[in-house]
Image (cartoon, coloured by chain):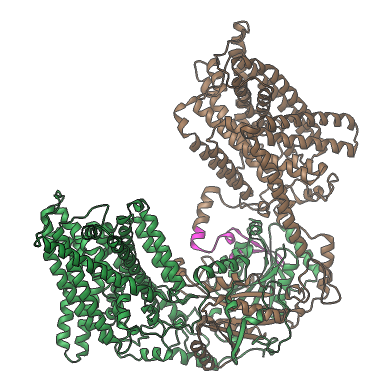
Chain colours: A brown, B green
């Protein structure tokens, strides 16, 4: 049976990854649209690899270390280990030997060590299920009849609120303006077909996934790609908010008692969707099949019955109730109505993201499916607009127009309830589509360094936890801020979607000009038409609904692009700073990103590291003696430092030091202002300034307490010292823990 | 001129400290009531010192370290140092050489290193002044005429609200009950004299400071001492709240426009007092002299004029306005009135805390001053009660009784305003007394391990910052919670004060029985009378005002004692766990608090430390190569560990490792659930279990970023790893920093 498309697309064997990497489309070595857990560990580029070898050649260890005192494969020698004081399991059993030099962690090895940590892990496991291994990857492909409902839930569900959005704007100009709904709908149908045809051409050109971000970035450059991505991100967030708002109003239309709980219901639904997706809804595919077909069937039945009744009265339109005009019927209003109706097209890009999930030949099946989807959309959308016109319906605050139609068509029997139930269900499923696509988009952005790296991480249920949580938070925030009111959310919606459409199709125009495949001129023209129409709608939406809320999106898109670029710049600079360079003959390299000449941090070879070990000692007890013993055992030059608040104390300490035997050089620093951390940090900085090539290792004893509240009773000097020393170059901080039962 | 008593008492030369230590009074080696910055570094006890020498004898360094590569006295060699990249000053100039092996930090050495830290330090310096050296200690002693106003502001200011508190309770039983104020006042005068005489005897017995905590602890044991301390702590907090509430109502009585800002005004005053005390109000003494005498003069003038007018009409009392009774005139009400009036005695213990601040012979001068103070208190208190009775005044919500008296006595001229101003001023100064005494009390408690150690720390203005902030927070909290309303605070007040009085004087009874000095029987009887009377008032206050709020104190005192004992138990256990024990001949000691046999953390001698260095490597870049070089340069057995999310990545990494030259043993761990920290921690735990005597040093590269927001873009694996490894015994964590400009 079918599986969730994104999930299915998410994992393919690594042979696929490599094939993806050789894909000739992209201007840079494209790693394809595939999701692998290894993305967090990108391979070295050839230059760095060469530098690595050159560095390795010069590596000399000053003193040959002894053999390892322990078997790193964890005692296949098997000298019956005693369970440790802090362990619950014999820890050795947590790892299995895979091959020489490689261990494999078993499930329990992921359990946190602390008691609260384990309790949380148990709660987590109950809610979200046990962790899934990277090998639990799905290879199933979807048949077209399964793919259709899965991929079209977002698109088809849009007809539940699209027609109403159009009429809700027209009615502002009074009842008489409602007649315009038919010509506007006709224009929208043209737009749907144009965009649909345009996307049909994108699919064979990008058989590994034709998301707007990738197509725009490949053909129009990074900024265009990021703009498309920003548009899509907003689109996904709003898809969740709008679909859930519409779904909740489908419920409250049928059951008005729930109206006051609108916001609560919506947030609950978002939480359930988040939890389900964190769990990794593996059988999500099956869930989709029935409701989508049921919804289509319900709407088709509604149309059939509705038109049959209208035919009974000779297709004479019922005149709508008189509504006073609150705005004049200007061009702006018509444009706003048009762009509001255009939200019926959101979700059309779902197929192009999911091409690799189809059965072979993937792109052909995907293209066919897209054709069916657009066909169904046109039928449902046009049919509903016509029927609304014939019945003279206008938006009402307490009921959706679809619900009104249902009540007209099915005045008795369970049919009305069925219609509302399938509508609510498909809308919630449509929201789920965004939960599949948003984290994947962030994954691709993160892989290119345009989003935080944490979005690369596959959680323990093989889902992108961080992306899912980000989406749920953003959607819930917007939902609450707008009170779960569909009509106020619609103006924000169209801009992002049509920005992505426009850029994707403009990208295809460039693509055809570059590649000049067979019939490229015709394809170019078709994509250009799609791009132009989408661009027009984008403009209409941005201008027409600017004051209604579109300004938010108009600000958010460049802000997101800017942020993504700042993030990219940081990662690029960091990568540059940490990149390996071949060692020069001279020990000092004045090259750009490397640290200043002679600095300890520049040393990449053990024979170049010069040590000075420093042990701050406040008083002589077991903890500080342990730190001193540790320091001395390293066999490097060692200096103990004591900070005294006054001379008398300094003398007393020195006398104790003599009593101990004066085994290490001691320097006391009198701090007449009684601060400890500051003078110590400055002393280390002074030592560093004197000999910048020295690596100063500061060894701090750290008393580890059992109970958290006990930590309030201590000054946490170790943490404060660590924070103060962070900024100093060449200062290594070593914590020697002493565990006490108390 | 005189200085603040607590400050003057705070610092005396160390000869005094040693004399104090030999004081024969205490059952334990008492370190006196002196405050030194060295209290944070208590000396070793003789047993530990002996153990230290024994451990030192067995100390062997496995490899003789080379000479120090740098002069720890910071280059009196003077090879003109380059200012460091992160430094602003040539750091070497921050230290001066005192004597061989000892440096002295100069002022700038206390500046924090970061830019925000320095900006904050500048703000701090502007608000609170530059840091003060430990040597800036005040030796001045007070003359009696200066000591009297300084020490009596708390006590004498109480008459501003004490009489009103008494009458406010009586009036609940209607106008007729007001006649009882005269006999109750007579009883209170007896109490004042009894307690005063009792304290007079305490002073010569404890010439180094006769605070209730110390007297009660010495004679009645720790629990009694802690109870007295808890009572005093509550007393000090309430002194601030009540004095400021009364001071603010003195202002609002004269200027009713300020009434709505009562809470704001009070919190502002607390903030100003806190800031002043953080600054360390060095000339606080002088501030006290004038207002206290002015207040006494104003009240005396008020009494004079008032009684003259009353004499004019033949001392015929004006009948008070009829007030309906809201409660019956029961015994409980009378007792409540009595204990409310007893708050006039708060502050009587100030002299006994400050004995060492008097000129020699200290105790004699202190005793004389106490006598004067009590005499003045009796005159003012009795005079006011009588005058209130003669004028038939009852409490009014918009004006204090003192203000009403003032308006009666001084209907014209500036005298009324002067009275209110001196009243407000002395009340605010009284609050300041608590700011002197509360942190000192916490210091003594902390020195005995009954309060968090941070209260031992002398801030950079030689004030106990932590104690001051704690007091201000607690007082502000209570002030706000009670809306700055004096009458609602009074019921909480008496219980704590009289608990401390009772315990202190009961302690003296025991003291006389033990010491049997000349005339001990008479002294014992006098103290017993004082203790009995105080105990009665305590009982009356606790029972009579239980429902009015005293229950809070009745709960708080045992809770504080419990908390102090828990804190003490923790410190004692920790001290025991970290105490030095002489090494036994066998390497393994199965003695109590030491770690389990053969554990790495038990080793206090360098030759016993067995190393294994472990370097987790995520990818090969400059940071990880630096960590590997650092690890290898230590010359200890070293193992690199790589955690891979899947097999393919593990293979790729191993191949890179080979390209580098395979200089160190590498173990890869495949983590099929993609977690990194958990498996690594468990692997280390498994290694530890196999060879518990090994010290595992985990060397983690830490990329130090410049901008805080950039940290959001990184997973902070280093911190998470450190947190996960905290619980593991014998695992040392070393951070090797790599600073990047980005």
Residue sitting at 69 percent across and 42 percent down? A557
Classify the position of the C terminus of chain B by image quarter: bottom right
Q: Is residue A590 left or right of residue A611?
A: right
Nearer to us in this view, A134 or B548? B548
Q: Position of residue B34 (x, y in %)?
A: 38, 83
Residue sitting at 48 percent across and 90 percent down? B51
Q: Quadrant of residue B146?
A: bottom left
Q: Is residue B665 left or right of residue B150?
A: right
Residue sitting at 63 percent across and 65 percent down? B718
- First to last magenta residue range: A93-118
Q: Position of residue B479 (x, y in %)?
A: 35, 59
Nearer to us in this view, A453 or B59? A453
The reply to whether residue A133 is in sight is yes
The reply to whether residue B494 is in sight is no
Q: Quadrant of residue B280?
A: bottom left
Classify the position of the N terminus of chain B by image quarter: bottom left
| Looking at the image, residue B580 lies above or below residue B384 | below
Residue A598 within the segment the image draws in magenta: no
Q: Residue furthest front?
A: B413
| Count of marks overlaid on the render | 0
Nearer to us in this view, A712 or A333? A333
Q: Position of residue B488 (x, y in %)?
A: 27, 57
Q: Is residue B207 left or right of residue A142?
A: left
Residue A110 within the segment the image draws in magenta: yes
Q: Position of residue A696 (x, y in %)?
A: 67, 79
């Amino acid at each position: 049976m079918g599986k969730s498309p994104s999930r299915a697309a998410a994992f393919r064997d690594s042979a696929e990854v490599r094939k993806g990497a050789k894909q000739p489309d992209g201007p840079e070595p494209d790693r394809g649209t595939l999701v692998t857990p290894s993305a967090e560990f990108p391979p070295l580029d050839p230059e760095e690899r060469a530098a690595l070898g050159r560095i390795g050649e010069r590596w000399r260890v000053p003193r040959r270390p002894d053999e390892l005192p322990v078997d790193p494969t964890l005692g296949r020698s098997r000298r019956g280990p005693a369970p440790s004081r802090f362990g619950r399991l014999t820890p050795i059993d947590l790892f299995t030997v895979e091959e020489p030099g490689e261990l494999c962690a078993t499930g329990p090895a992921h359990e946190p060590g602390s008691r609260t940590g384990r309790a949380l892990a148990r709660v987590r496991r109950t809610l979200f299920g046990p962790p899934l291994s990277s090998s639990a990857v799905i290879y199933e492909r979807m048949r077209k009849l399964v793919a259709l409902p899965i991929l079209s839930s977002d698109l088809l569900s849009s007809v539940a609120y699209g027609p109403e959005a159009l009429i809700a704007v027209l009615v502002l100009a009074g009842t008489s303006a409602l007649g315009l709904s038919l010509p506007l709908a006709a224009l929208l149908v043209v737009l749907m077909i144009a965009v649909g045809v345009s996307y049909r051409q994108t699919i064979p050109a990008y058989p590994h996934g034709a998301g707007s971000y990738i197509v725009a970035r490949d053909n129009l450059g990074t900024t265009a790609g990021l703009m498309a991505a920003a548009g899509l991100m907003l689109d996904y967030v709003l898809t969740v908010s709008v679909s859930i708002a519409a779904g909740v109003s489908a419920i409250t239309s049928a059951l008005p008692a729930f109206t006051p709980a609108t916001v609560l219901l919506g947030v609950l639904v978002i939480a359930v969707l988040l939890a389900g997706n964190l769990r990794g809804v593996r059988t999500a595919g099956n869930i989709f099949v029935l409701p989508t077909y049921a919804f289509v069937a319900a709407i088709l039945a509604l149309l059939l019955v509705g038109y049959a009744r209208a035919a009974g009265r000779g297709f004479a339109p019922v005149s709508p109730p008189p509504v006073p005009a609150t705005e004049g019927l200007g061009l702006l209003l018509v444009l706003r109505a048009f762009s509001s109706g255009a939200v019926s097209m959101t979700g059309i890009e779902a197929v192009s993201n999911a091409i690799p999930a189809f059965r072979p030949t993937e792109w052909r099946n995907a293209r066919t499916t897209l054709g069916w989807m657009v066909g169904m959309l046109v039928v449902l959308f046009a049919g509903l607009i016509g029927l609304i016109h014939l019945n003279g319906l206008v938006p009402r605050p307490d009921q959706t127009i679809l619900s009104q139609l249902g009540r007209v068509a099915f005045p008795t029997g369970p049919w009305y309830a069925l219609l509302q139930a399938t509508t609510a269900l498909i809308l919630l499923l449509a929201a789920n589509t965004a939960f599949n696509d948003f984290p994947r988009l962030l994954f691709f952005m993160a892989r290119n360094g345009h989003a935080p790296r944490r979005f690369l991480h596959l959680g323990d249920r093989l889902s992108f936890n961080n992306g899912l949580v980000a989406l749920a938070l953003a959607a819930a925030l917007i939902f609450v801020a707008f009170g779960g009111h569909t009509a106020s959310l619609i103006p924000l919606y169209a801009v992002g979607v049509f920005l992505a459409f426009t850029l994707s199709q403009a990208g295809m125009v460039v693509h055809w000009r570059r590649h000049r495949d067979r019939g490229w001129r015709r394809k170019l023209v078709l994509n250009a038409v799609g791009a132009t129409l989408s661009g027009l709608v984008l403009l209409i939406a941005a201008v027409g609904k600017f004051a209604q809320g579109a300004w938010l999106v108009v600000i958010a898109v460049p802000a997101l692009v800017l942020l993504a670029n700042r993030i990219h710049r940081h990662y690029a600079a960091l990568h540059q700073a940490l990149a390996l360079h071949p060692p020069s003959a001279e020990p000092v390299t004045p090259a750009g990103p490397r640290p200043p000449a002679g600095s300890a941090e520049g040393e990449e070879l053990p024979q170049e590291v010069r040590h000075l070990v420093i042990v701050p000692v406040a008083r002589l007890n077991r903890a500080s003696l342990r730190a001193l013993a540790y320091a001395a055992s390293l066999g490097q030059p060692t200096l103990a430092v004591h900070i005294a608040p006054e001379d008398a104390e300094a003398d007393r300490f020195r006398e104790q030091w003599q009593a101990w035997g004066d085994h290490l050089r001691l320097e006391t620093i009198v701090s007449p202002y009684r601060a400890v951390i500051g003078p110590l940090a400055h002393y280390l900085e002074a030592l560093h300034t004197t000999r910048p090539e020295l690596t100063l290792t500061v060894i701090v004893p750290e008393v580890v307490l059992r109970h958290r509240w006990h930590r309030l009773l201590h000054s946490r000097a170790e943490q404060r010292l660590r924070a103060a020393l962070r900024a100093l170059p060449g200062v290594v901080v070593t914590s020697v823990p002493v565990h006490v039962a108390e």
